[in-house]
Image: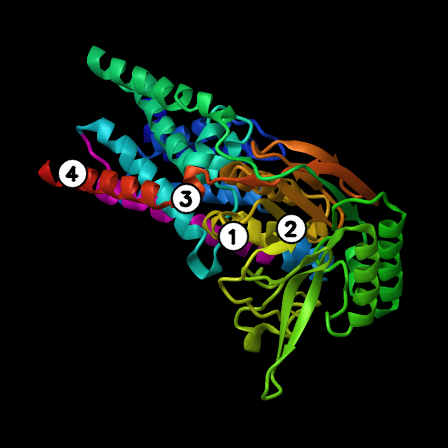
Amino acid sequence: MQFILHKRWIHHLLAPLAGCLLTLSLAPFDLWPLAPLSIALLYLLLQEATSRQALLTGWLFGFGLFASGASWVYVSIHDYGAAPPLLAGFLTLLFVAALALFHALQAWLWVRYLRHPEHRLLNVPAFAVLWVAMEAFRGWFLTGFPWLYAGYSQLEGPLAGLAPLGGVWLISLVLAMSGPLLVQLFCHRLSRRQTLTRALLLPLLWLGSMPLHQHEWTRPAGQPLSVSVFQGNIEQNLKWDPDQLAAQLDLYREMTLDAATADILLWPETAVPLFQDSARPWLDFMHERALERGSALITGIPVRHVADDGRRSFYNGITVLGEGSGDYLKQKLVPFGEYVPLQDWLRGLIEFFDLPMSDFARGPAGQPPLQARGHSIAPYICYEVVYPEFATRLAAQSEILLTISNDTWFGRSIGPLQHLQMAQMRALEAGRWMIRGTNNGISVLVNPFGQITAEIPQFEQAVLHGQVVPMQGLTPYLRFGSWPLGILCTLLLLFAIQQKRKH
């Protein structure tokens, strides 16, 4: 073990490997035991590192994590942004290298200010709190990239029962405590009392949450609703082609009219590739057909608003037709996909910065849930479902969760499968059924335990039929959000700082 700690070149190899292990714990690999092992390896490499060494080790860990887990960005830039391979590779590398700085900062802060040379048990909560704080910060800074959180690895693991209590970040906290405890238990020389303490803490953290996994935090608010989800599987290069507009509208119309009657009919993100005001006659026709069937038809559609001064704003939206009502305008926009940061400088440089519909405005906060068949539905468009705190606000006002997406941008990469895993976590956190409709998969129904009950595979044109149950009541996470976890982390951090100053 000392050989590993003192050979810097071994650090440089093991740090990115540890990051890759965390990716393997997430979808689509789902090797959940690798999550605490990944964190344990990072913790081990930081044991005797200087502040400067910690900065590099943390960055290498982050580089391994994001290079393996977020490399699907290359597909969007190259395949659909028409960037040459070298340029797409360079932009992807720049993206990954920038994200790795979050873990570099975390490692540096822990070594520089919180690592305790004598009271090693205090290192555990200090390290874990910094880990969770950095995940939360990454999900907020510059609109955020809330992807690849450690807690998602436990959707099928023993810690899943913690999600309704404190969300994905509570799971991340337990994982980030487990890694250091493993290192101290198996790699440090400890007294009998110290060994016993750690040997009791580890199973307490893991086994204590297992009975919660099947606890029913919410209860039915009505009879089951029949659902049909329509997956058109339209190629991205045809999506915004004016010559293909009529064919796409005909496809969804015929698929819907040919399908069996259902309470809720769901089309994916921008299934209608035409502004809502321009599509009004066609929407009115589908509204009447939905009313005849007693169905609520929910579809993604771009929306155009014209202000009194003539200024136009464009939104990525959802509208409800038939036996329902409401419109929703997307609030969390995808950088470069739906808006271009520094667009005065970047637009026109390469085709990637001029993607179709990349000039959306942000929808207003405080929008009400959608209404369908007398029930409240929390809508999320694509990227929005990966923001834990954002998702809780609408979920707490609703009986069913709904998300639409167009993951065609990610091709056959692992990105869509990671996206699905995060949507499942939102259902588990909220204790509610989720309906997920996408253009090319994976369209699914998810129960309140985060489990998929029906699905359509990727890259198929098909209709999913199933049932969801409206739910009422609030999980602790919906009721209180991340405030309890934030207070706990703050107290743990202050205690660790105080103890460090004493010595």
Q: Where 351 sits versus 379, above or below?
A: below
Q: Which residue is labeled 4 in the image? A: 500
Callout in the foreground (2, 3): 2
Q: Which residue is labeled 3 in the image? A: 479
Q: What amino acid does circle 3 point to?
A: Arg
Residue 178 relative to residue 390: left or right: left
Whole-percent x, y for residue 353 in the image: 64, 68
Callout in the foreground (4, 2): 2
Q: Which residue is labeled 1 in the image? A: 394
Separation (CA) of disc 4 from disc 3: 35 Å
User: Can the viewer see residue 139 in this picture?
Assistant: yes
Callout in the foreground (2, 1): 2
Extreme residue toward the left, this view: 502
Looking at this view, is 316 or 348 the one in front? Answer: 316
Whole-percent x, y for residue 91 in the image: 58, 58
Q: Are marks 4 and 2 in contact (CB under 8 Å)?
A: no
Separation (CA) of disc 4 from disc 2: 57 Å
Q: Where 159 sits versus 485, above or below?
A: above
Q: Which residue is labeled 2 in the image? A: 374
Separation (CA) of disc 2 from disc 1: 17 Å
Looking at this view, is 339 or 313 the one in front? Answer: 313
- The quadrant of the image that shows the N terminus is top left
Whole-percent x, y for residue 112 in the image: 24, 44
Q: Of label 1 and label 4, which has the lower sequence position? A: 1
Q: Of label 4 and label 3, which has the lower sequence position? A: 3
The local secondary structure at tag 2 comes to loop
Q: Of label 2 and label 3, which has the lower sequence position? A: 2
Q: Of label 2 and label 1, which has the lower sequence position? A: 2
The span picked out in magenta is 90-117
